[in-house]
Each structure stands twice: as C-alpha cells, then as structure tokens.
Amino acid sequence: MSASLLGVLIPFLVGIIVGGGTAMLILDVKEGIFK
Amino acid sequence: MRTYDYIVTIVLLALGFIAGTFAINLSKAGFDLAIESFDLEALDRFHKGATDTEQDYDSFYKADYYYERDPSYRKAERIAREHGATLDLNIMGNSGILTIPEWMSQGTDTSCEAAGRAVYEILSVLPEDFLIHILPEKGGGFVPSRRNPVDLAWAKELAGIGDPDQGQYPDSLKKLMNINY
C-alpha cells in the first residue's frame, strides 16, 4: 500500500471512530443510561 | 511534512468525524423507527395469552429489542447487583425473579429489611404492576417475605420504609439509597 493512500485512509478512519464514539456517547447520555 | 499535508490530514479527520457521527445517528434513527413499529397492544394480548396469532408472536421477539432499549430494565438489574442479588426479568410477564444472597434469607429483621429495600428499589424503576419473586441463592430455605411475589406496596412494607414525612430516613440517606419517594 502506498504511503499516500495510508496518509488518506488513516486520518479518515480515525475520524470515523472518534466521531462514531462521540455520537454513541452523546446518545447514551441523552437516553439516561449513565444516570 | 509540508504544511499542505497537515491541512489535508486535519480535513480528513474532520470528514471522518462527520461521517462517523452521521452513521451512528442514522443507525439510531433506523432503530427508533423499528421500535415505533412495535404493536404494543398485540404484545399485551400475547402476555395475557389472549391470542396466538403470528402478529403477536412477532411482537414477542421484538420485545427483545425493546428490552435492550429501555434503560429501566438495565437499571433494575444494576440495582440488584448493587445489593448482591441477581435479577432475572421476564418483561413479557411483567415479573422477575430476584435471587438473593444467603445472608438476606436468614430471617432476621435486618435481612428482611435489606431484601425488601432491594425489591423496593428495583420495583421503583420498573413499570407499574411488576411483581418480583424472591428466591434464596442456596435454594429452598427461608424467603424474607410472607407474600411472594412481592409488589411495590408490600416491598415498601417489608423494607420498613414508613411515611417519608415522618423522617425515618434523612434526605441524604434517601439519596444515597437511590430511593424515590
């Protein structure tokens, strides 16, 4: 795999994981799961 | 690394973040739609054994999803664990089995009160009309309630929780015990 492709994929995947995790956390807090 | 590369990386991170957030919200919205499509009346008929149509049978399985979604069931199970007991809920039958630790089934006032308090706290977070069957961990033996299954009113009695106006428990303790009067 070329370095440039990795340079595109890795930041994008990290963004997806962090974004998805944040959204799940926000939804869980909204549903009152951590109360 | 050139400045251009940093900018591209940050833009990609932001795009990924947006895509991730969007995907999770989309799946949540889809899930909510699925929940709303439940025929809760059919589910109720199924509880009561009134019908055994395919539609009601379908709702029986959908209830699994309902259970996963409603935090009150999970909260009830967590309260049970905090009391050292295990709660097996049967949401189809509005009932549950609370397996209590050995010390709660010794028949002393303290153990009966402790069991009552556990049941009371559990029933407080569950829908109305729920009944909890108490079972001792070791099987057989003493059940700390004359009435079994226990309803909310009797659990309150068993826990020795009197009129809150009498100030039997100070507010700080009530908060600690997570009791909602």
Image (cartoon, coloured by chain):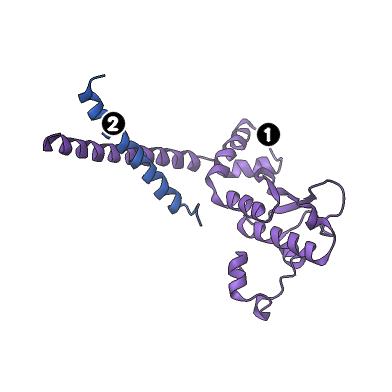
Chain colours: A blue, B purple
* Residue labelled with disc 1: B52
Residue located 75% across and 70% down the image? B160
In the displayed orientation, state which residue is furthest to the right.
B141
Chain ID, mark 1: B
Which image quadrant: the C terminus of chain B? bottom right
Task: Identify the residue at image location x=76%, y=65%.
Answer: B113
Q: Can residue B179 be seen in this view?
A: no
Amino acid type at mark 2: Ile
- Name the foreground residue: B50 vs B129: B129
The residue singled out by tag 2 in the image is A10
Using the image, tell me which numbered label, if any, was put on residue B174: none
* Residue A29 % position (x, y): 44, 53
Image coords of residue B96 (percent x, y):
71, 48
Residue B153 visible to an observer of this rendering: yes
Dot 2 and dot 1 within a common chain: no
**Amino acid beneath label 1:** Asp
Quadrant showing the N terminus of chain B: top left
| Left or right: A4 in relation to B54 | left
Task: Give how far apart the Cα atoms at labels 2 and 1 are.
Answer: 53 Å
In the rendered view, does B37 fall on the left or right side of B91? Answer: left
